């Protein structure tokens, strides 16, 4: 079990603290001015183009901070243990950096994407970060699965091939939808419905993985006979990350499924619903990513002979 605790301690990150008061004050002032102008003109504030664009600028800023935190943490980990190559911990932070960075780069141009030709290009730019988010956090499930199997002396040879195959199927299926959308342009609305249903199914798969292996690892740590501060810390880490990630993927599945069957009331990622966009992306990506990066905040130990690469 000591090996289990040591393996898990490697998969953590350092917390970063940011002062949002200046940015928050500027955004609030801009929003107030836009709202006042909309009221004066008799236009609903959510139909005001400035407010719509502002909502995506706020989201881009939040994703930019997450991307920066992940990059800084990746650099710090590389400086701490450069001799171990691309460990699971480093890949996890790299994927967080790329995923959040794509959102931060695309969202400021969200309105322009409505007019990109062919339209499938805009779909690819909007959908790709969601796929990367799935890969990023199923990588965490893979890490836990390897720890659990190693601790139980179970075979681990099939875990990584399964992870690769599941992700390959997800990307290939989504790519086929993009190709379909590029060929059959008149059926673009059907493409969106199929893509949304697929995203809901994929989110359920991710949530199941966290419940299965997060729950198993949590129970195994609880049954560990030696009471220690390290054991209690690992219990909190596994329990909190499992709860956060399961909740975010279930919420995504429910919200996306609702948007399919109640398109008028529950449409997601559309310019006409700025508050709904902020709530959706905050619940399913921004808040979970921030919490996980904070919970898994410890850097790996410095050069020690018993530390092993986990990639």
Image (cartoon, grey):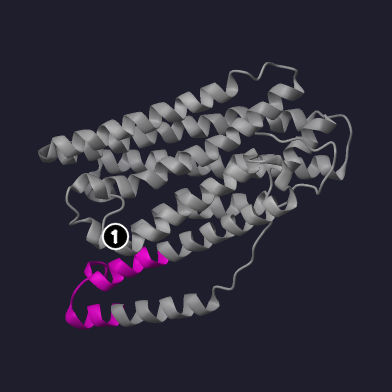
Is 67 in the magenta?
no
Between residues 230 and 102, which one lies in front from this camera angle? 102
Quarter of image, res 180: top left
| Quarter of the rendering occupied by the N terminus | top right
Q: Residue furthest front?
A: 83
Between residues 125 and 33, which one lies in front from this camera angle? 125
Residue 130, percent across and down? 41, 44
Q: In the rendered image, is residue 272 in sight?
A: no
Residue ID at (56%, 36%): 139
Q: In the rendered image, is residue 205 in sight?
A: yes
What is the span of residues highlighted in magenta in the rendered image? Answer: 35-58
Q: Is residue 159 above or below residue 277?
A: above
| Quarter of the rendering occupied by the C terminus | top right
Circle 1 packing at 10 Å, graded few (<14), some (14-19), many (20+), is many
Between residues 258 and 248, which one lies in front from this camera angle? 248
Is 57 in the magenta?
yes
Residue 186 horizontal side relative to residue 300, left or right: left
Residue ID at (71%, 36%): 309
Mark 1 sits on what residue?
110
Quarter of image, res 108: bottom left
Residue ID at (78%, 45%): 233
Q: Main secondary structure of the magenta part?
A: helix
Q: Is residue 120 above or below residue 309?
A: below
Residue ID at (31%, 50%): 268
Quarter of image, res 202: top left
Q: Residue furthest left?
A: 186
Residue 270, percent across and down? 26, 55
Residue 143, percent across and down? 64, 33
Residue 78 horizontal side relative to residue 21, left or right: right
Residue 231 horizontal side relative to residue 169, left or right: right
């Amino acid at each position: 079990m000591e090996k289990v605790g040591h393996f898990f301690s490697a998969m953590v990150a350092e917390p970063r603290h940011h002062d949002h008061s200046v940015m928050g004050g500027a955004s609030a002032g801009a929003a107030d001015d836009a709202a006042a102008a909309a009221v004066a003109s008799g236009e609903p504030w959510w139909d005001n183009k400035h407010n719509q664009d502002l909502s995506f600028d706020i989201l881009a800023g939040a994703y930019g901070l997450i991307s920066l935190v992940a990059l800084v943490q990746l650099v710090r980990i590389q400086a701490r243990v450069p001799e171990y190559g691309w460990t699971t911990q480093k890949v996890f932070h790299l994927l967080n950096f790329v995923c959040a960075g794509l959102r931060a780069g695309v969202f400021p141009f969200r309105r322009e994407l409505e007019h990109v030709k062919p339209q499938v290009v805009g779909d690819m730019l909007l959908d790709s970060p969601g796929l990367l988010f799935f890969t990023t956090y199923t990588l965490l499930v893979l890490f836990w699965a390897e720890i659990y199997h190693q601790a139980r002396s179970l075979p681990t040879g099939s875990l990584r091939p399964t992870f690769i195959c599941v992700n390959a199927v997800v990307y290939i299926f989504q790519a086929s939808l993009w190709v379909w959308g590029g060929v059959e342009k008149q059926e673009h609305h059907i493409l969106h419905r199929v893509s949304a249903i697929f995203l809901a199914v994929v989110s359920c798969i991710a949530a199941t993985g966290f419940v299965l292996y997060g729950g198993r690892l949590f129970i195994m740590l609880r049954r560990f006979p030696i009471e220690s501060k390290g054991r209690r810390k690992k219990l909190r880490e596994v329990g909190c990350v499992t709860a956060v990630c399961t909740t975010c993927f279930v919420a995504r599945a429910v919200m996306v499924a609702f948007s399919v069957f109640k398109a008028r009331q529950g449409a997601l990622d559309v310019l006409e619903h700025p508050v709904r966009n902020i709530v959706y992306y905050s619940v399913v990506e921004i808040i979970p990513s921030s919490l996980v990066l904070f919970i898994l905040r410890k850097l790996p130990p410095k050069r020690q002979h018993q530390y092993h690469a986990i990639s």
